[in-house]
């Protein structure tokens, strides 16, 4: 476990388990977390539990124990994948306990990790596996995650959502040709479902990194690592590195793309307004809104006041606007000529 250097403890957890009563579990889970000032997001679905939350150290320890041993869960979450890290500031604004059809959305019923899953590979054995010439190494995360860090030699599927992974497999991988596949993701959950999907579609040898990138960065020393860059995380820390310490990446306030220090030195980067990923004409409206927001923030700072727009609502609107701009750009590229 990383050194306890932050005021808040962060728990990333998931478990594929049979939870047909997930709707009945939600109220008690919500009450347990609120009573302990825990924030973040937990997803309940008939196939299990997934999420990341943060809170006081004691509160997070109590939550992890309760999920494993409380009578309402009937032992179904024992053995869950858990990763602990630390943050100086609370990385989440609020608590969300959500009910969804899947804990990680693939929309492929044949991919059921409760029935079949690939071969787990421990972090200590990962370098040897991905260094073999007969192994195809695939990063199952989204394009913006790959952009700031990945394993050396890994393939980027260039997907924006996990559901697109099915098309990547169909168009780029062949069970008759690609005999050995090694996959990885942030915490391991995507790879469990991805491996189940690939086994269901005829791939024979499918491996995945047990505990994901987080476990690898926690376990493997930097001088022995095949990891390059930082690992994107879905909270205000933005990225982490070896030892699960907070990284240097920040989010573009316009398009919410994670930016490395080198990208922030790019000529197209303008603080609070745009970055190299959203400097095109299709992002004009997003940039205009970001520029106005940045102006108001600077004025508020000059007056010694907090800017009310600098919150989750503004971030959500920025993300929605950026997604819309991306869709428009994709459609434009798809037009003939």
Image (cartoon, rainbow, N blue to C red):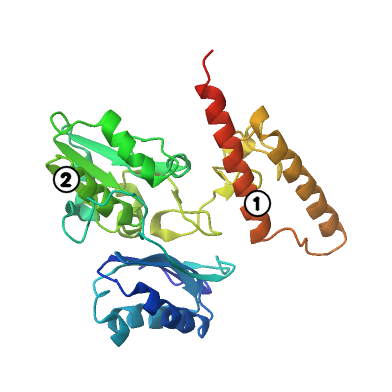
Identify the disc placed on residue 67.
Answer: none
Of 284 and 146, nearer the camera is 284
Question: Distance of mark 1 from mark 2, alpha carbons?
Answer: 39 Å
Residue 4, percent across and down?
44, 72
Q: Are marks 1 and 2 in contact (CB under 8 Å)?
A: no
Is 122 situated left or right of 152 in this image?
left
Badge 1 crowding class, 10 Å Cα cut-off, few under 14, some 14 to 19, many 20 or more, is: some
Q: Is residue 328 above or below residue 9?
A: above
Q: Secondary structure at mark 1?
A: helix
| Residue at image location 59% in from the left, 46% down from the top | 256
Residue 116, percent across and down?
16, 55
Q: Is residue 185 above or below residue 41?
A: above
| Residue 154, visible in the rendered structure | no
Q: Which residue is mark 1?
A: 317
Residue 69, percent across and down?
28, 83
Q: Residue furthest right?
A: 303
Which quadrant of the structure image shows residue 76? Answer: bottom left
Q: Is residue 116 above or below residue 332?
A: below
Of 160 and 91, nearer the camera is 160
Which quadrant of the structure image shows residue 66? Answer: bottom left
Badge 2 crowding class, 10 Å Cα cut-off, few under 14, some 14 to 19, many 20 or more, is: some
| Residue at image location 75% in from the left, 39% down from the top | 288
Quadrant of the frame with the C terminus: top right
Q: Residue furthest top?
A: 337
Q: Which residue is mark 2?
A: 199
| Residue at image location 62% in from the left, 54% down from the top | 316
Q: Is residue 299 above or below residue 182?
A: below
Chain-order first, disc 1 or disc 2 = 2
Of 67 and 242, nearer the camera is 67
Q: Secondary structure at mark 2?
A: helix
């Amino acid at each position: 476990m990383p050194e306890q250097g932050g005021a808040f403890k962060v728990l990333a957890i998931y478990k594929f388990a049979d939870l047909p009563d997930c709707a009945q579990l939600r109220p008690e889970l919500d009450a347990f977390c609120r009573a302990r000032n825990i924030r973040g997001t937990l997803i309940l679905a008939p196939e299990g539990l997934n999420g990341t939350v943060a809170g006081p150290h004691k509160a997070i320890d109590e939550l992890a124990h309760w999920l494993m041993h409380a009578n309402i869960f009937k032992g179904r979450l024992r053995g869950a994948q858990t990763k602990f890290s630390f943050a100086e500031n609370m990385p989440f604004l609020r608590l969300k306990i959500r009910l969804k059809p899947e804990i990680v959305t693939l929309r492929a019923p044949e991919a059921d990790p409760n029935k079949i899953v690939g071969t787990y590979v421990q972090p200590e054995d990962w370098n040897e596996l991905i260094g073999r010439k007969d192994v195809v190494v695939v990063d199952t995360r989204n394009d913006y995650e790959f952009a700031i860090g990945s394993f050396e030699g890994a393939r980027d599927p260039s997907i924006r959502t996990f559901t697109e992974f099915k098309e990547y497999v169909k168009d780029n991988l062949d069970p008759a040709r690609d005999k050995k596949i090694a996959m990885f993701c942030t915490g391991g959950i995507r790879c469990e479902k991805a491996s189940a999907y690939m086994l269901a579609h005829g791939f024979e040898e499918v491996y995945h990194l047990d505990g994901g990138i987080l476990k690898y960065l926690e376990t493997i020393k930097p001088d022995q690592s095949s990891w390059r860059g930082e690992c994107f995380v879905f909270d205000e820390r933005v990225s982490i590195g070896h030892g699960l310490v907070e990284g240097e990446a920040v989010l573009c306030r316009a398009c919410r793309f994670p930016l490395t220090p080198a990208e922030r030195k790019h000529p197209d980067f303008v603080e609070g307004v745009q970055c190299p990923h959203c400097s095109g004409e299709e992002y004009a409206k997003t940039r205009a809104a970001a520029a106005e927001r940045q102006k108001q923030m600077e004025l508020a700072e000059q007056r010694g006041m907090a800017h009310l727009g600098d919150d989750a609502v503004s971030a959500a609107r920025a993300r929605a606007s950026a997604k819309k701009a991306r869709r428009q750009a994709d459609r434009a590229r798809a037009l003939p000529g």
